[in-house]
Amino acid sequence: MNHGRIVFSQIMDFFPQRRFAACVDRYRGDHRVRTFSCLDQFYCMTFAQLTGRESLRDIETCLRAVGPKLYHASLKAKVSRNTLAKANELRPWKIYRDIALILIAQARTLYAHQSLAMNLKRAVYALDSTVIDLCLSLFPWAQHRRHKSAIKVHTQLDLRTNIPTFVRITGGQVHDIHFLDQVMFEAGAFYIMDKGYIDFQRLYRLQQQHAFFVIRAKNNLAFSRIASRPADKSRGLHSDQTIHLSGPKSSVYYPDPLRRIHYVDVELHKRFFFLTNNFTLSPWTIARLYKFRWQIELFFKWIKQHLRIKAFYGTTPNAVKIQVWIAISVYVLVAILKKELNLKASLYEILQVLSVTLFEKTPLKSLFSPDLYNFSEANLHNQLLLFDF
């Protein structure tokens, strides 16, 4: 890295600008644009995500405060909140979706050899959604309840890498099961879902594509038992059965046998009933697979805490989608940076360091050098101690 380049510019070395330009051309994003290009917009929104800016005025004020350095950050246009607001409102959000998917593909290639904490060589995905509450008066197009608006971020997360592989943004009123209509199921892969995704017509489509699923069963499931396998209750397994669905609709929608596992988590003192179309894995492996589904909950919690997707810079559907897709792009870009530079720091630590050093002229990798965090006691003889024991 060049010592004369600022950190923000070094981060953008990992951003595929040529492929972004192709995305912009595909949707004519820069048509009749003279100064503030789509790339400028992406840089401004990336700055806002990395530094946790609260509003458009906040973005404008902070960027103008470092005015001479904007050129070195490849921001050639003067940043105005009105210009940025108009860009977020009018530029096609699909540009930023497409570049996010390109970054996701790049990250998945880098993390392809990551292993799950169990001896399973197949791909494992978790499907879930998170609700982001909005003000009804400002976001009437996303009405979720009578007095409330919300959007849903439906996500397919690769549990080996914690990289989202497919994302769909909808209004809060859209049910989770409709996300299954958008997913391209991978033969031989496992899809882990909560009971909100139970729709046997859609699950049978997954079965026909030779993929596997593990899903929690509802309490009112109508079925008939075909066979039972030995159960070791000392390890939490109460039953392992082969069943046929017997409901008037479910038996038609899913005519093949299913496997039903009754498992009790001793630590949580909680009962689980799992349905799966895999008959070869041990019941404890099935239970562990479902336990890994918690990673998608942690992913949602992480991005809500550390990226700007709970408060929005614009109120139109286009502005909201642009902000969410750029937030996902930033998350994946940091993951790529971590892998490419072989950094030991966590994504949280990387984000925290970047947030205060974006315009410093420091080699990127040296920001996370272990030497920076190891202070010799010999150098502290003149340092006052806060607590002297």
Image (cartoon, rainbow, N blue to C red):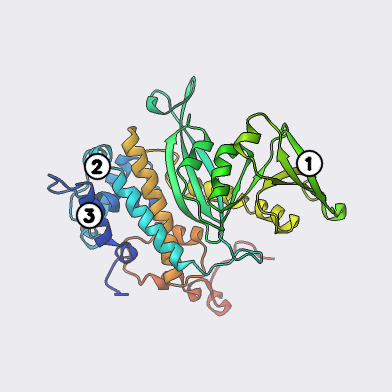
Mark 2–mark 1 CB contact (< 8 Å): no
Tag nearer the camera, 2 or 1: 1
Please state the horizontal and vertical placement of residue 26, each as a whole percent of the image: 23, 50
SS at mark 3?
helix
- Residue 333 visible in the shown view: no
Quadrant of image for the N terminus: bottom left
Please state the horizontal and vertical placement of residue 129, each as a whole percent of the image: 52, 41
Mark 3–mark 1 CB contact (< 8 Å): no
Please state the horizontal and vertical placement of residue 47, each as a whole percent of the image: 33, 53
Write down the residue under mark 2. Answer: 91
Kindly identify the residue that appears in the image at 47 percent across and 47 percent down.
183
Where on the picture, by quarter, is residue 106?
bottom left
Q: Nearer the viewer, residue 24 or 138?
A: 24
Q: Is residue 135 above or below residue 11?
A: above
Write down the residue under mark 1. Answer: 225
Kindly identify the residue that appears in the image at 40 percent across and 60 percent down.
105
Between the C-alphas of marks 2 and 1, the distance is 56 Å
Please state the horizontal and vertical placement of residue 49, each as a whole percent of the image: 38, 50
Quadrant of image for the C terminus: bottom right
Q: Is residue 374 above or below residue 138?
A: below
SS at mark 1?
strand
Tag nearer the camera, 3 or 1: 1
Rate crowding at label 2 as few (under 14), some (14 to 19) or many (20 or more) other CA atoms within 10 Å: many
Q: Which mark sits nearer the N-terminus, 2 or 1?
A: 2
Q: Tag 2: residue type? A: Arg
Q: Tag 3: residue type? A: Gly
Between the C-alphas of marks 2 and 3, the distance is 25 Å
Q: Count every numbered label the image shows and give the total.
A: 3
Tag nearer the camera, 2 or 3: 2
Write down the residue under mark 3. Answer: 67
SS at mark 2?
loop
Kindly identify the residue that appears in the image at 69 percent across and 45 percent down.
257
